[in-house]
Image (cartoon, coloured by chain):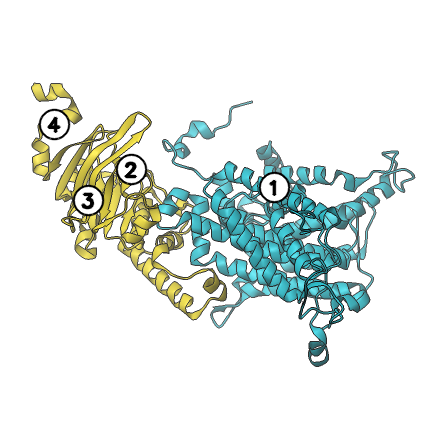
Chain colours: A yellow, B cyan
């Protein structure tokens, strides 16, 4: 197996009945890069994401992560290997506290089983204490200082987005998938978030793949941009190349915009 | 309808308060403890007034009121000693002390007569209440923590009972194996006779394994589908029990006759002479029920212990996460199947132990104990008290089991005595009313009322309360919570 990228998809395809949502996409995310996935609404971006995290099983094609073929594995196996994600419409555990949300994210990194939990063995005690300390640290890193005990549903929209990232970080990912992280944010929050994504790479050494509609974010932060339209990959390159690409302009604005 | 009743009660409350010269604003600025005390006192006073109104005043009502006030009012949880929060244990210890001393209530005074409810529960009822508390707490793992609707919990109860039947009776007459059982004459027996303590453990493990076997194919299903499949299993198990007297020529369950007698528990002669523990519960005569009750309390305590430890563990968090959002939980690395199966197996374990213990207490395992309505009954206990909350489930189990065994009959007797034929007050109906006959109708009505006015249960966990108030949303298409039109009721 070739390993010239942290994540590779080979001819990844998803059909829902007769509809082809993702059409044989072959694509690579190099290690340490920030890659954006853009495309008009309904282009199949989220479906593609769901295949990269095991939520959907691809109709055809393969997902290779860090040299290992993960196609057909359940979602928790993807998380275990080091793919963390957030959701387009926030899916926090809304009735749990911020700290508990992050602790659930650590599930695959903790070991305590049923019997140890009932007996509360010293090992589990240590593990829990360490997990809580690390969860607090993650919350602070994500800009949620002193909000450990707040219930998810009571948090502001921006904080919920941040908490989702903190929860994803708790899974100790190598690759972080962000699905429209700035949707619904005001310009100030968007700016802060863009900065935050940059810090994820510099301070945590993460590779980031994000779906994004806000072009300022896409152009500001990404090394590479991939464009999907009707499930097909129509362009790939640096932000500057994508901005000039005729097929991309056509997909977004229609043929008239190009010919005029 | 619900909102209107709540509002009516609220405005009546404020009307009284403002008459007393206490404005809404001043009330809200009072310390929380004061407000809590006043509220509790008012409710207890209303209760006592109602009792007085019906002319059945008894001093024991005052004693009960005092106990309720002492338990409910002070904020024990906040008590600290040298900065350590020791207060959390005070309430459980008090309740436990009340429970442990229960068999002596009759000795202390002539108290055991309550207004309307009549005499306080007998020891045999108390044993039943403890056993059902254990089963309800077991089901709480599945329904309350992991949010999986299980309508066939009776299957685990049956499995536990039959484990006791197989390993502590004469059922398998060709075998001769005594392993620590009490009350057996060595060499003069047939069948397996294991010590009940060992049987309890074996029953728990065997039932947990059955739980896993049932769980693996079914837990892939969601919500309603899972409920239907568990319903099916709940029907299959008793049918096997009923028809298991000839499984290809082999008598497994003794059919409709059931397996009886089953050995009683006991600690044997050595422990009796050296530690003072009863050698054999069945030879204690009148005091046997006490021993059974205390033992059941220990089993309940173990269940509560496991429940509370697991709630705050990695596994407990994963259960709650699955209940709240399965997709998100899976994406965060929670293996769905394995985690759900653990919830199922844990619930089954406690159901099995409770079933085996109850079989030993009743001296037999009979197939007509394992009808579908028992599943619903246990589920009602969990829902009535408050899903996911240990206190709530304990309360629900004790209350419903008490009503089932004695409460309804007592209330019926009281009603007939006052309003029935030849009643002492005024005659309303002319034929004796058989209240226990309407048992499930009454339970249904209680459940409907609770669901209307307090859908989170009588003593809910704070988290469940929030879920019921706001609902658990799965991927709203747009932010409905901010769309006022959807939440403003139509003018009627």
Q: CA distance from mark 1 to mark 3?
A: 67 Å
Badge 3: how crowded within 10 Å, few (<14), some, or many (20+)? many
Pointers 4 and 2 in contact (CB under 8 A)?
no
Q: Residue furthest toward the front?
A: B249
| Subunit under mark 4 | A
Asked whether B491 or A147 is in front, the reply is A147
Pointers 3 and 4 in contact (CB under 8 A)?
no
Disc 1 and disc 3 on one polypeptide chain: no
Q: Residue under circle 1?
A: B14
| Subunit under mark 1 | B
**Residue A122: which quarter of the image?**
bottom left
Label located before the other in sequence (3 or 4): 3
**Residue A88: which quarter of the image?**
top left
Q: Relative to residue B463, is residue B352 drawn left or right?
A: right
Residue A162: x, y in percent?
Answer: 30, 47
Q: From what the image shows, is residue B295 above or below residue A148? A: below
Q: From what the image shows, is residue A32 above or below residue A186? A: below
Q: Residue under circle 3?
A: A8
Residue B160: x, y in percent?
Answer: 63, 55
| Subunit under mark 2 | A
Report if residue B64 is visible in the image: no
What label sits on residue B368 in the rendered view? none
Q: Quadrant of the C terminus of chain A?
A: top left
What label sits on residue A247 in the rendered view? 4
Q: Residue under circle 2?
A: A58
Q: Which residue is at 58% across, 43% downward? A: B233
Q: CA distance from mark 2 to mark 3?
A: 14 Å
| Subunit under mark 3 | A
Pointers 1 and 2 in contact (CB under 8 A)?
no
Q: CA distance from mark 4 to mark 2?
A: 26 Å
Badge 4: how crowded within 10 Å, few (<14), some, or many (20+)? some
């Amino acid at each position: 197996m070739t390993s010239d990228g942290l994540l590779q998809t080979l001819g990844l395809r998803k059909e829902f009945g007769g509809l082809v949502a993702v059409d044989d996409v072959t694509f690579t995310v190099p290690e340490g890069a920030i890659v954006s996935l853009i495309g008009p609404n309904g282009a199949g971006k989220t479906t593609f994401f769901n295949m990269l995290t095991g939520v959907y099983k691809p109709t055809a094609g393969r997902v290779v992560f860090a040299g290992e073929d993960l196609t057909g594995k359940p979602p928790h196996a993807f998380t275990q290997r080091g793919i963390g994600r957030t959701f387009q419409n926030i899916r926090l555990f809304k009735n749990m506290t911020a700290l508990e949300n992050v602790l659930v994210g650590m599930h695959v990194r903790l070991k305590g089983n049923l019997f140890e939990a009932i007996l509360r063995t010293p090992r589990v005690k240590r593990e829990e204490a360490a997990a809580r300390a690390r969860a607090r640290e993650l919350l602070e890193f994500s800009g949620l200082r002193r909000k450990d005990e707040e219930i998810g549903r009571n948090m502001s929209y921006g904080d919920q987005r941040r908490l989702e990232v903190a929860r994803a970080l708790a899974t100790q990912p190598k690759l972080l998938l962000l699905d429209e992280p700035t949707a619904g944010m005001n310009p100030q929050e968007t700016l802060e978030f863009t900065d935050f994504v940059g810090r994820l790479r510099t301070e945590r050494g993460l590779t980031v793949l994000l779906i994004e509609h806000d072009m300022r974010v896409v152009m500001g932060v990404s090394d590479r941009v991939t464009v999907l339209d009707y499930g097909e990959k129509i362009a790939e390159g640096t932000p500057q190349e994508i901005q000039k690409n005729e097929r991309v302009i056509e997909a977004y604005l229609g043929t008239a915009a190009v010919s005029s | 309808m619900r909102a209107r009743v709540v509002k009516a009660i609220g405005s009546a409350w404020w009307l009284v308060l403002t008459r007393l010269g206490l404005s809404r604003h001043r009330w809200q600025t009072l310390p929380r403890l004061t407000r809590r005390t006043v509220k509790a006192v008012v409710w207890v006073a209303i209760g006592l007034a109602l009792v007085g109104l019906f002319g059945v005043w008894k001093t024991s009502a005052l004693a009960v009121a005092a106990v309720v006030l002492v338990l409910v009012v002070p904020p024990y949880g906040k008590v600290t000693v040298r900065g350590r929060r020791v207060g959390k244990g005070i309430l459980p210890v008090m309740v436990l002390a009340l429970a442990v001393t229960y068999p002596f209530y009759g000795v202390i005074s002539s108290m055991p007569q309550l207004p309307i409810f009549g005499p306080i529960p007998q020891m045999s009822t108390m044993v039943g209440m403890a056993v059902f508390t254990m089963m309800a707490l077991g089901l709480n793992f599945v329904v309350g923590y992991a949010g999986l609707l299980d309508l066939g919990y009776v299957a685990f109860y049956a499995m536990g009972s039959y484990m006791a039947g197989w390993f502590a009776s004469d059922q398998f007459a060709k075998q001769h194996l005594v392993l620590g059982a009490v009350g057996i004459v060595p060499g003069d027996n047939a069948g397996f006779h294991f010590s009940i303590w060992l049987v309890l453990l074996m029953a728990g493990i065997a039932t947990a394994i059955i739980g896993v076997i049932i769980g693996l194919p079914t837990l892939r299903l969601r919500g309603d589908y899972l409920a239907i499949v568990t319903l099916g299993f709940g029907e299959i198990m008793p049918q096997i029990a009923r028809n298991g007297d000839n499984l290809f020529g082999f008598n497994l369950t003794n059919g409709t006759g059931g397996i009886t007698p089953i050995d009683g528990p006991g600690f044997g002669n050595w422990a009796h002479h050296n530690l003072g523990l009863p050698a054999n519960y069945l030879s204690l005569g009148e005091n046997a029920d006490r021993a059974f009750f205390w033992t059941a309390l220990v089993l309940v305590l173990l269940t509560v212990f496991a429940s509370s430890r697991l709630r705050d563990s990695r596994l407990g968090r994963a259960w709650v996460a699955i209940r709240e959002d399965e997709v998100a939980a899976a994406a965060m690395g929670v293996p769905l199947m394995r985690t759900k199966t653990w919830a199922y197996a844990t619930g089954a374990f406690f159901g099995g132990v409770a079933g085996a213990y109850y079989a030993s207490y009743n001296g037999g395992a009979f197939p007509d104990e394992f009808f579908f309505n028992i599943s619903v009954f246990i589920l009602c206990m969990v829902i009535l008290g408050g899903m996911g909350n240990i206190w709530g489930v304990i309360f629900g189990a004790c209350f419903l089991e008490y009503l089932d065994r004695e409460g309804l009959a007592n209330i019926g007797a009281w009603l007939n005595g006052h309003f029935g034929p030849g009643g002492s007050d005024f005659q309303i109906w002319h034929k004796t009313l058989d209240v226990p006959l309407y048992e499930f109708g009454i339970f249904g009505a209680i459940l409907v009322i609770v669901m209307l006015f307090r859908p989170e249960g009588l003593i809910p966990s704070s988290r469940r309360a929030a879920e019921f108030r706001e609902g658990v949303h799965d991927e709203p298409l747009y932010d409905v919570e901010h769309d006022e039109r959807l939440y403003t009721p139509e003018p009627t």
